[in-house]
Image (cartoon, grey):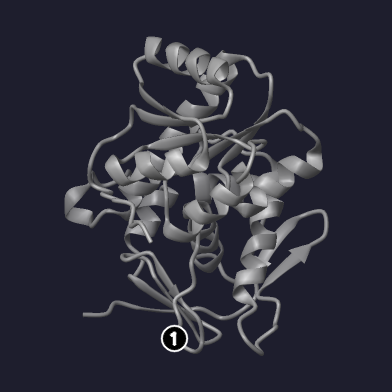
Amino acid sequence: MIRYPIRRNVNLSTRILIVDDDAGIRSLVASFLEKHGFHVDAAGHPAEMRERLAQADYALIVLDVMMPGEDGLSALRELQRIGGPPVIMLSAVGTDIDRIVGLEIGAEDYLAKPCNPRELLARIRTVLRRTAHAAAVGLPAQQSVPPPSGTPAAQEAQQPEVLYFAGWRMDLETRLLHDPQDRPVDLSDGEFRLLRALVQHPRRVLTRDQLVQYALGTESDSYDRAIDVQISRLRRKLASGETRADLIRTVRNEGYMFVPAVTRTREA
């Protein structure tokens, strides 16, 4: 199996990969994005995407859903499994159900084709800002500028690195989650940030707007349904083995509450 290089400390904010079987769309999107300062590579199918990923790092992938042979959703599942770059899906099938399926699998955003290139550009910039913010939060304190006191980011910086709840262990510094059997649980970047927001505010109702701000930042344009989709994905991943307790409670017309008690410690 090909191991894709993932070098988180490299600044690749302008390198993008377009994956689409339509050569005209690849050329049009690549040309438009390059005019706006991005370095763009293209692939005509998922196999070529893997070749590109084995050769270089990308800040983001724009991935078509409907391709002959292996489709984009299958490719997205693999990217999520190996911790690939964030993905914006493009599809000629633009129903709400298809959009939700893409988001549930792990896409950061989803656009129906044909789309306005300027809207795609705006979505790309939003996702890159979001992931850059998450990377900055994940850095050790001595490598980042201290946030203003009293802000959610400042409060987060003061939190111990390891949180425990219902037998689970969540390491904020290494960004790893282990279940009660000490098995690692794979989370997408968005899922980790959302769970971190919930665990750091236990037994307190958080509205969807608050979750967007805590988990994604004030510049995010995420919407209520996206939060609901990620909560659903988190619930499935937190239902480990025979432990089926619902750790995240829905509070009707208000938001969500993280139910278990949380203990904090700083491990040497």
- Quadrant where the N terminus sits is bottom left
Is 199 or 107 nearer to us in this picture?
Answer: 107
Would you say 133 lies left or right of 74 here? left
Is 58 or 181 nearer to us in this picture?
Answer: 58
Circle 1 packing at 10 Å, graded few (<14), some (14-19), many (20+), is few
Is 209 or 75 nearer to us in this picture?
Answer: 75
Residue 11 locus on image (x, y percent): 25, 36
User: Mark 1 highlights which residue?
Assistant: 182
Residue in the picture at 63% in, 43% down: 69
Residue in the picture at 32% in, 62% down: 158
Residue 103 locus on image (x, y percent): 65, 47
Residue 23 sits above or below residue 175 on the image = above
Residue 38 sits above or below residue 178 on the image = above
Would you say 252 lies left or right of 225 here? right
Residue 229 sits above or below residue 48 on the image = below
Residue 119 locus on image (x, y percent): 59, 19
**Location of residue 230 by image quarter:** bottom right
Specify whether residue 192 is in view. yes
Residue in the picture at 41% in, 45% down: 50
Three-letter residue code for mark 1: Asp
Q: Which residue sits furthest front?
A: 69
Residue in the picture at 37% in, 42% down: 51
Assign a secondary structure to mark 1.
Answer: loop
**Location of residue 113 by image quarter:** top right
Q: Which residue sits furthest left?
A: 142
